[in-house]
Image (tube, helix red, strand yellow):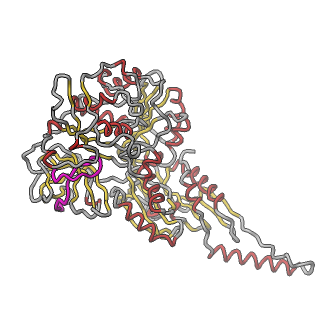
Amino acid sequence: MAGAAALRRSARRISRHLVAAPAFSRSALQQPKCLLSSQASPEHGARGAVSGSELALYPPERVRNFSIIAHVDHGKSTLADRLLELTGTIHKGHGQPQYLDKLQVERERGITVKAQTATMFYRHVTASQDSDMPKYLLNLIDTPGHVDFSYEIDQPTADPDNVKDQLKRLFDIDPSEALLTSAKTGKGLEQVLPAVIERIPSPPGKCDAPVRMLLLDSYYDEYKGVICHVAIVDGALRKGDKIASAATGRAYEVLDVGIMHPELTPTGVLYTGQVGYVISGMRSTKEARIGDTLHQAKSTVEPLPGFKPAKHMVFSGLYPADGSDFEALSHAIEKLTCNDASVSVTKETSNALGMGFRCGFLGLLHMDVFHQRLEQEYGAQVISTIPTVPYIFEYGDGSKVQVKNPAALASNPGKRVAACWEPTVIATIIIPSEYVGPVIMLCSERRGEQLEYTFIDAQRALLKYRLPLKEIIVDFYNELKGITSGYATFDYEDSEYQQSDLVKLDILLNGQPVDAMTTIVHNQKAQRVGKELVEKLKKFIERQMFEITIQAAIGSKVIARETLSAMRKNVLAKCYGGDITRKKKLLEKQKEGKKRMKRVGSVDIPQEAFHELLKVSNSK
């Protein structure tokens, strides 16, 4: 999802805007004086071949690169479908809806997880031009969406005038430039591509310079290896060229090059300003770093700005539900990370869960999708530990350590913690005005700092808060949707670390810490969180033949406790009458046996207990 902050940045960079809005009447805008060729020519037909000589007919001034950026449920992938149909890139009614969404999780949840690109050929003909005018080459990027797809916006009750006023106030977009279109109903679609050509500048670049390209995305193909999506900034790329990575310094030979039309279509060459794919013999997507600059080998070029390595902000342990399935889980994670190099994976061992993995993710949705793909695509049954974020702890001797796994934070009495820092985010929340009070209260409970509070119009308010990342990684979004009847929109971007009063909270069963349940919490919430954790565990752990003590502790101080009574066998069932001494001996023998079992017996923690612990809120 591109939220308010991302849209503001886009508004600063682009002087004129193309806005895809819900289905509205076009009477408010003047009809464009252009004709639309909805059929592709034979040489550029759907799934047709495109040669390198044909691509040479499209210099940068006849190339337009654009993306579809929108907030919640604005039909980005559906709009991409309509544009592909209008240009003849795909046939209408053939293939699946949301053509560019390939993954099962994308289709089930109605979200775009991976950005997809497609090349289209379009003849822009005005009333004063000859119908034989050359076509334009349009490169479309369908950007990832968000988790909220709970309501439709193409409704007869839509208010276009109010929406245009909001665009003016928030992003300084001229209302007269907004295109009223709907991919769902098809209204206004004929205005979109002419506006792309007329309003979006052609890509800059030097056609006669050494090749330099931006790596947009990559994925692993079982037969072809790593396939990189690139944008040619300078020069031309041809099959057989030698290229190198500015980030890693490794050199490769171009084995295949072409465009996505919309599937891989070999052309043998890509020219300045064009977007396509490159196969160069990379063995892992870890070599293909998104944002990297690929350039002509053995030449020195200035790397393109903006490249940043992946920054993992959410960490979680993954363990097989059945310990004997570790190798199967390892194989599934290895295969999945071939297509998602942004996940960090390290092996770890838990006393409670056995061998598993500590995985780092870019964010919440990234983690959720990764888990779902493991189960759907590889049939892996996993137990996930409580998600955590990277903390920084400073000790009295001045040393600092970054903690990604709370269990790894040693409770050393001789090493005093002097200060702690936790990552924060800047959250933007848009809500109907009647829900302002409950949302402010929710953000305050989550230790939020209010940065902005404005009214977009008489019906909607915009709130901006600085929130600890830890406070939103489990149930914040669901609670926000609950108290606003599903009308809230939520977006966030990473911010800096802030100092905080943090403590390590251990869960103990019969005095033994369960490392997979260790977490780091704010000191003020520790007792409340510990109490809730032990209460949930008591509900889900089955009774044993011995008593089980469940405790939450900070260091050596127990802050919450529950006791699960033992199952008792009636050892006196066969003692009818007789001396009471015999009965006492049997009861004492049973008591001693239970003590031994408590010392050496293991407590089985069911998978459901871990799932329930994920739902524990740090604010209740």
Is 538 placed left or right of 194 in the picture?
right
Q: Is residue 548 above or below residue 392?
A: below
Image quarter of residue 279: bottom left
Image coordinates of residue 474 in percent, x first then y, are 50, 49
Q: Residue furthest right?
A: 577
The number of numbered badges drawn on the structure is 0
Image quarter of residue 429: top left
Q: Is residue 425 above or below residue 341?
A: above
Seen at 76% across and 79% down, the residue is 589
Is 242 placed left or right of 400 in the picture?
left
Q: Is residue 267 above or below residue 544?
A: above
Is 67 placed left or right of 603 in the picture?
left
Seen at 62% across and 76% down, the residue is 600
Where the N terminus falls, by quadrant?
top left
Span highlighted in magenta in the image: 249-269
- The answer to if 250 sits in the magenta stretch is yes
The foreground one among 402 and 107 is 107
Where the C terminus falls, by quadrant?
top right
- The answer to if 327 sits in the magenta stretch is no
